[in-house]
Amino acid sequence: MSFREEEIVVLIDEDGAEVEFEIIEIFELKENKYAFLFPIADEDDEAVIMKIVKENEEEVLMDIEDDAEWNSVVEAWEDIIDELESEEESLELEQDSNQ
């Protein structure tokens, strides 16, 4: 199975409860793939970033346990968000100038 954006996945939280997440974005960093997931039902749950690894020819989501890797992934995610916001602002300015 390969993960894709807008797919719904079920993760088990620290209390053993199932929580549904939507994959918002899949991105690559240093030859690794990561997924940004947002909780569907409970807005109090936090969004998470998980590493996508191949295990027995299937992709699985894994926690990022290495602090240096985590810091790099968070920085890359923040860069993606900044780029998306910049593109959105450019589109808004373009639309405003066309009116």
Image: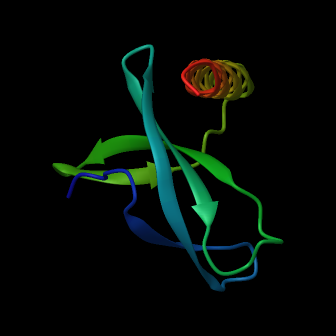
| Horizontal side, residue 58 vs residue 89: left or right | left
Q: Could you say where residue 60 lies in the image, as x and y percent from the top left?
A: 36, 54
Give the residue furthest to the bottom: 17
Q: Give the vertical position of 67 relative to 86 (above or below).
A: below
Q: Toward which corner of the image does residue 98 lie, by quadrant?
A: top right
Closer to the camera in the image, 52 or 21: 21
Question: Which quadrant, please, contains the C terminus?
Answer: top right
Q: Give the vertical position of 53 relative to 33 (above or below).
A: below
What colouring style does the render use?
Answer: rainbow
Q: Toward which corner of the image does residue 32 lie, by quadrant?
A: top left
Q: Residue at x 47, y 55 (%)?
A: 23
| Horizontal side, residue 11 vs residue 53: left or right | right
Q: Could you say where residue 93 lies in the image, as x and y percent from the top left?
A: 65, 20
Q: Residue at x 66, y 23 (%)?
A: 89
Q: Residue at x 74, y 27 (%)?
A: 67
Q: How many marks?
A: 0
Question: Which quadrant, please, contains the N terminus?
Answer: bottom left
Give the residue furthest to the right: 44
Q: Give the vertical position of 90 relative to 61 (above or below).
A: above
Q: Could you say where residue 28 lies in the image, as x and y percent from the top left?
A: 42, 24
Q: Give the vertical position of 86 relative to 52 (above or below).
A: above
Give the residue furthest to the left: 57
Give the residue furthest to the top: 30
| Horizontal side, residue 43 vs residue 97: left or right | right
